[in-house]
Amino acid sequence: MNNPVRSPKNTLLARIEALNCRIQEAKKRDLYPYMHSSDAVDGVHITIRGKPMLQFSSYSYLDLLGHPKINAAAKKALEEFGTGTHGVRFLTGTTRIHQELEKKIASFKKTEEAIALSTGYGANCGTISALLGRNDTVISDKVNHASIVDGCILSRAQFVRFEHNDMASLEESLEKAPKKGVKLVVADAVFSMDGDIINLPQVIRLCRKFKALLMIDEAHSLGVLGKKGTGIEEHFGIDPAEGLIDIKMGTLSKTIPSIGGYIAGNSKLVNFLKHSIRPFIFSASLPPASAAAAKASFEVIEEETWRIKKLHENMHYFLKTLRMNGFTTLQSQSPIVPIIIGDDAKALEMTRLARQEGIFIVPILPPAVPPHTTRIRTTVTAGHSLQEIERAINAFARIARSLGIIKP
Ligand SMILES: Cc1ncc(COP(=O)(O)O)c(C=O)c1O
């Protein structure tokens, strides 16, 4: 007989209750750091309950939010098509603007074609699960984004995780993978929690050796890596025309101030995906105004290369100065800079004190990151001035010293 006290339903209710209690307790002590509603945002500032703050946790790497050309493109599309399409891309939701966006993405990523979806999450989940099945193997970096992990699980392929950015571990996983069936290696280009960069040349070498397909998620490298901001191939001096990355995934919600995700690749692959990705076939299409904003953003990245130069300068200065102050920032080589705290309570307190001083940051706690690696995940953008970066770092250092996070 089921014990009514410990039934599965009661266990679930107890879990829900426990989480609600933790949230309530944190809110009472003004330590709840999530879902604050902001009255105004741009890449560099945020206003919450009337308090303007410097933003150090935005993905607006090139500070494109509110760019006049991008806003004008969105407004024009809004006038022409209204606010939505009432349809999925596959049936009634494709407009001329969606097709123009896909053409632009393909030309930017130097591939034959591209497919644009309503979210990056859907692009990852939908693509991996459309390509793989039970007899296949997907080999994924241990700290890949959740949307990749979910796609791997959804595909029902054998799901193998290699140690983070560890090429010996990747090689071992490829060696052990069954000979029959497709092998797909998948990794973030810039890791969203650690800010480091995948060792693409070695990953490519191993994929060729073991005849595996390669998928790279460029959510945080588009507009960020390479002098022209075209991404990870440019960073490593790899010619995109060689087609060494089979599936190039990216988002339209980080550097690109819109919403959506894309897959760029050869025509046959993209055409296959257009007929098989479930979020493309069963979920409503990207609003035309968002698609127009995304297309205009790619043009701005090409036209205003000074933004990428400024981002790189800011990124080097931010990283160097944080490290000089004694912060642990892992192997970050990008605008995403984790400040490792380890202790949840200290991370929450540091967040509260920094916000009090007018610097907006967010803490990331397990299970989103491995146990004992609770961090403040900071980001720097092309929009920050050197004075603003210094102001933030001075505040971080003062607060971290007072909490015993760094040495006095
Ligand atoms: C590495 C990575 N991939 C995919 C996604 C999902 O993208 P989207 O927010 O467009 O759904 C994110 C979002 O944070 C991400 O960081």
Image (cartoon, rainbow, N blue to C red):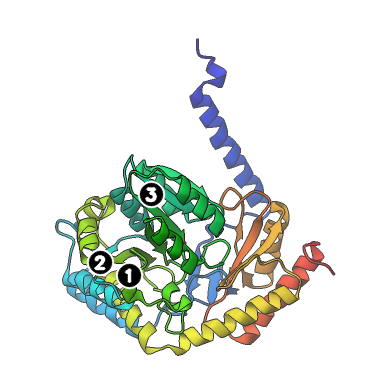
Q: Are marks 1 and 2 in contact (CB under 8 Å)?
A: yes
Amino acid type at image mark 3: Gly
Amino acid type at image mark 2: Asn
Residue 256 versus residue 15 in the image, above or below: below
Quarter location, residue 340: bottom right
Measured from the top left, where is residue 341 in percent x and y?
71, 59
| Badge 3 density bin: few <14, some 14–19, many ≥20, Cα 10 Å | many
Amino acid type at image mark 1: Gly
Question: Could you tell me which secondary element the residue under label 1 belongs to?
Answer: loop
Residue 253 versus residue 131 in the image, above or below: below
Which residue is farthest left?
92
Residue 130 versus residue 14 in the image, above or below: below
Q: Dot 1 corresponds to which residue?
A: 243
Question: Could you tell me which secondary element the residue under label 3 belongs to?
Answer: helix
Residue at 68 percent across and 68 percent down: it is 354
For marks 2 and 3, the one nearer the N-term is: 3
Question: Could you tell me which secondary element the residue under label 2 belongs to?
Answer: loop
